[in-house]
Structures are given as structure tokens and as C-alpha cells.
Amino acid sequence: MQSKFAAAALLLIPAIPAHAQETDPPKPVIVSGSVALVSDYRFRGVSQSDEEMAVQGGLTVTHTSGLYAGAWGSNLSGWGTFGGANMELDLIAGYKTEVTSGVNVDVGVTWYMYPGGADLTDFAEPYVKVSTSLGPISAFAGVAYAPSQKALGNWSATPESKPDDKEDNLYLWTDLSSGIPGTPLTVKAHLGYSDGNPGLGPNGTSVAPTGSYLDWLVGADFVAGPVTLGVAYVDTDISRADSAHLLPNFSSTKDGSSIADGKILFSVSAGF
């Protein structure tokens, strides 16, 4: 879905024995899930866990028609963003289908929730994703657009801000990955672009905190059965000057560094 490319675990469908494939009809509903431990939860390049570790998990129910619904959650830092919430819970629903040979389209919506946080933090974000294969490379592109909502509003102390303001947000991204022949390694890359509210939201946050910015990731995964070990470098083009009006919300509580600075991330995940 959105750009949790480095942090979220892979959702893997359980393996079915060969004899079962030959004799049993396909199940109309498939349940898959994942659990993960990450060194830092980055959402679109920005740390949501104060640059600390996070435990994450997801569950998806998929029907043979292409309809699906699921939930994904992660702990947060709780140090001030999202009204001090210690958890993010995403509810997801959509429809995925193959529109032509080798090309899949996925249309859905994500409802971002921050239980325990202040009011006006939750928001909805519809998305469209397209995936295909380019030879040995798996290619993926997506558009997520959150229509105007109070949780995305500009409530900062600037002339253009106003109480109960509503703003929208656009996110464009692409992911590429490819297995290295003869090895259990997969290399991956991500590039995203955010465009939205350049000010502070109702709880000192914004999905596009500096108005518009790029985030990117390069990394590799080592797959051993149901377990995946990942390492990646994530960064943004957000400068300290660009984020000055967001301080102290935009800095680590440990050393004052920007929570959008470049960093090497580590993860271990398992699918079921």
C-alpha cells in the first residue's frame, strides 16, 4: 500500500502441498498475514517511532473475486505526534484484478487511525496501484490521494492558517525489486513524492510536513523460508531549514536530529 516499503513485512500466502493443489478446489477466501520487527518505523521517509524499534503486524482476507480487507498496525513513539498516540492502526479495503496479461490493478482505501491520540488525527486515503513484471524486475506504481480533511489541515501559527482548516494530500510512488539468480537475495528500490499541507496539523503533524518532498529507499532482502531479513537505506530531501517551522515535533528526542535524515534500517519479518 502506501510507502511502508522498508518497514512493513511481506504478506505471504501459505504454501499448499502439491497433492492438495491437484485434488482440492481453490478456497474462495484466503487469509494471510505477517509480523515484523523493524529498527525504525519510517512512513514516507519520516520516522514515526522517534528513530526507535517498532513491532508491526498485518492480516488480510482475500476473496477469489479480487475483493480484500485487512488491518495493519505498528507502535509509535507517542512523544507528541498524532496527539501522543502510541499506536497506528490502518484499516484497508479494496479490489485487485488482472486487467491484461501480466498487469494487475489494485483500487482501495486506507483509513489511518491513531488510538489513544487526540481528536482529529484519523483520515482516509484512497489509492490506485498498478503492478507488472519487466523481465526479471517486478515493477509497481501507485497514486494515493487523501481528499480535504481536518486531520490534514494547516493549523500552524502562520497567516494562511485558520481554525478547523481542511487540506488534501497527494502521494505518488514507484517500487522496483528483482531476485538475484541462484541466491535467496532480492534487491529493491523505492521513490516517492508527497504534496500537501506545508504547515502544522491540529496535533503538530502533517502527512507532507514541508509541503512537498521526495523520499527514497534502496535495500536488499534475504529470504529463508517464511522469514525475511531486510536491510535498507532510507532518506528524504527535507532539509533542516525546510523543517524549521515544525520543530521540536520534527526532531528526535534523543539528540535533536531530524526524523527525516538518512538512516540504515534493519528488519526481520515472517509471513503466514
Image (spheres, rainbow, N blue to C red):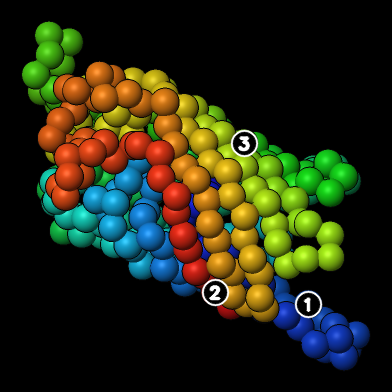
Q: How packed is label 1: few (under 14 Cα within 10 Å), some, or many (20 or more)?
A: few
Most foreground residue, 130 or 215: 215
Would residue 70 be visible to someone looking at this image? no
User: In the picture provided, is 158 more to the left or to the right than 186?
Assistant: left
Q: Which label number is shown at residue 26?
A: 1
State the image quarter where residue 198 is shown: top left
Local SS, label 2? strand
State the image quarter where residue 125 is shown: top left
**Mark 3 or mark 1, which has the lower sequence index?**
1
Of circles 3 and 1, the one toward us is: 3
Residue highlighted by disc 3: 174
Q: Amino acid at mark 1?
A: Pro
Most foreground residue, 181 or 204: 181
Question: Going 72% across and 80% down the picture, which residue do you hit?
Answer: 15
Most foreground residue, 157 or 266: 266
Most foreground residue, 108 or 16: 16
